[in-house]
Image: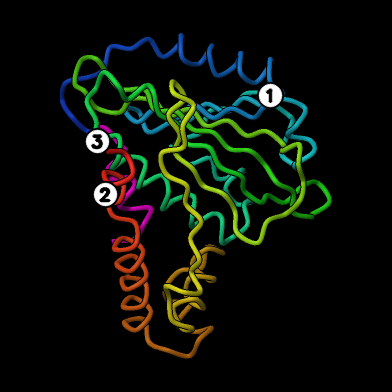
Amino acid sequence: MEIIEKLNSRLLDKTAEKCQLDLEVYKQRALVYTQMEGAISVLSDMQADKSYVYKSKAALELGLNMEESSTVIDSIWEEEIIKKIHPDDRLKKYIHELRFHELMDSLDAEVRADYSVLSKIRMKDKDNEYRLVKHRMFYMYSPNNGKLRFALCLYNIALDQTLPSVSDFMIINTTKGEVIVKDKLDYQNILSRRELEVLKYVGEGYASKQIAGLLSISINTVSRHRQNILEKLKVKNSVQAFKDSFY
């Protein structure tokens, strides 16, 4: 199963018992973050499979469409923003979000609000040059069915623009001010040369058929490489690793 399909299967809430949290309250919170922090805020509704995007003037610096300061999209994935992320960081972002979801699932409901994602990612700006952007993500769970209802993502242009060789992806306990997991995946030491090539094209959004043509290999071979990539990264970053770090 591909990483996006796996994330969708974990994140989207298809249960019959609906969450009663007030959507308008959380939309207002996302808007306030945008206005106060000069951020781009994305509130994703896992129950409706929709996202509400709010943009400050920072969006202009990143070359994002500012015809409307707020938009609604029929997906939990903010494609306009995601396509600007460096291909390596984009895939790492997906993998890290999957790890975060697995960690949250392993925790008691009353402590989940203590945790969030904090990362620095490379995004193309209005001049088509990469700039560092601080990315934060928070989960909000339903008190009715216990399922994930909202994910709030915040994007701010980072103060320190010294580009690292490997981007930071962290899970933090905001209550204690502690880093729970500091993830700097070095794919060079995990994946084979061919898997790295496949990973590059996956990160750039190519389908398996296109990758097969680019690398002159069969679609079945591409599928095998993609499965190997996920298996290797999952072995490297299992839920047990979370528990070892947390406990």
Q: Is residue 184 above or below residue 108?
A: below
Magenta span: helix, strand or loop, mainly?
A: helix
Earlier sequence position, callout 2 versus callout 3: 3
**Mark-to-mark CA distance, 2 and 1:** 38 Å
Q: Give the farthest residue toward the bottom.
A: 216
Local SS, label 3:
helix
Residue occupying image coordinates x 38% and y 87%: 218
Q: CA distance from mark 1 to mark 3?
A: 34 Å
Q: Which residue lies under the disc numbered 1? A: 69
Q: Quadrant of residue 32?
A: top right
Chain-order first, disc 2 or disc 1:
1
- In this rendered view, identify the residue nearer to me: 182 or 197: 182
- Judge depth for marks 2 and 3 and give the one in front: 2
Please indicate whether residue 27 sits to the left or right of residue 230 in the image. right
Instruction: Using the image, determine if residue 137 lies above or below residue 231.
Output: above
Disc 1 and disc 3 in contact, CB within 8 angstroms: no
Which quadrant of the figure contains the C terminus? top left
Please name the residue shown 35% across and 47% down the image: 99
Which numbered disc, 2 or 1, marks the residue closer to the eye? 2
Query: Magenta stretch containing residue 245, yes or no?
Result: no
Mark 3: amino acid: Asp
Between 247 and 108, the one nearer to me in the picture: 247
Report the span colored magenta.
Answer: 1-13
Q: Amino acid at mark 2?
A: Val
- Label 2 and label 3: CA atoms lie apart by 10 Å
Q: Residue at x 19, y 21 (%)?
A: 145
Q: Which residue is mark 2?
A: 239
The residue under label 3 is 105
| Secondary structure category for the residue under label 1 | loop
Q: Residues within 10 Å of mark 3 (few under 14, many from 20)?
A: some
Q: Are marks 2 and 3 in contact (CB under 8 Å)?
A: no
